[in-house]
Amino acid sequence: MSRKPVVGVLALQGDVREHLATLSALGAEAVTVRRPEELAAVDALVVPGGESTTMAKLAARFGLLEPLRAAVAGGRPVYGSCAGMIMLADRLLDAPADQVTIGGLDVTVRRNAFGRQVDSFESQVEIEGVAGGPVRAVFIRAPWVEEAGEGVQVLGRVVGGAADGRIVAVRQGNLVATSFHPELTGDRRVHALFVDIVRRHLAERAGVAGEEKGQPS
Ligand code: GLN
């Protein structure tokens, strides 16, 4: 029997509660993460939407930045939505010169990319790996992926309007990021995709541990 995945939500700032509720509804044990010890105890992490400059400063102040980078480098699954996408990006545009990120996603992300006049809007976005039709995507002062490296899988793009074709959902290994906020719509399919990645990651790790002990995996 596989155990319940423990998924943390980085709770420095932003819309933490909605992610916790969505993850719990999907059968994960959802916990808040504010300290390095709490990060060490989770199988995977969600970095929520909010304000990425504030979140980055708080992460540094709480001594979380390096542990977060180490978790990503070690293959821990992380899902970032909106500000969380910015936090996972290797490169930023329209950000203060001193804004730091966790990094790990080989993408260039433009902050507040949709422009001030479209502070927030909704769109229907087809997401690769999400069955059952397009996801209702809520964008709030959202970033987009301006450029994605070769190893990055584009999962979704805006269709129509001024932002037509812009990349708003990506995956690279165990990292997933969306420009929009699926936690605000009651549609759990993007989180389900992530929890599935977490479950596979745990099963793989259990398999490796079993082999090391000489058990059949
Ligand atoms: N504009 C915000 C930032 O740069 C992100 C907005 C959001 O997460 N809803 O951090």
Image (cartoon, grey):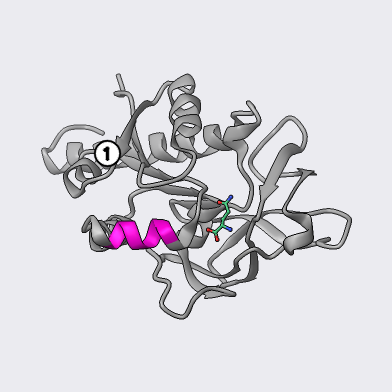
Q: Tell me which secondary structure the magenta stretch mostly adopts.
A: helix
Nearer to us in this view, 144 or 55: 55
Q: Residue at x 48, y 23 (%)?
A: 26
Residue stretch in magenta: 54-60
Nearer to us in this view, 29 or 198: 29
Q: Is residue 48 above or below residue 118?
A: above
Give percent across and percent down for residue 40: 20, 45
Q: Which residue is mark 1?
A: 42
Nearer to us in this view, 70 or 10: 10
Q: Which type of secondary structure does the marked residue at label 1 adopt? A: loop
Q: Quadrant of residue 131?
A: top right
Give percent across and percent down for residue 150: 57, 72
Nearer to us in this view, 69 or 116: 116
Is residue 42 shown in magenta?
A: no
Q: Residue at x 25, y 36 (%)?
A: 206
The quarter of the rendered structure image containing the C terminus is: top left
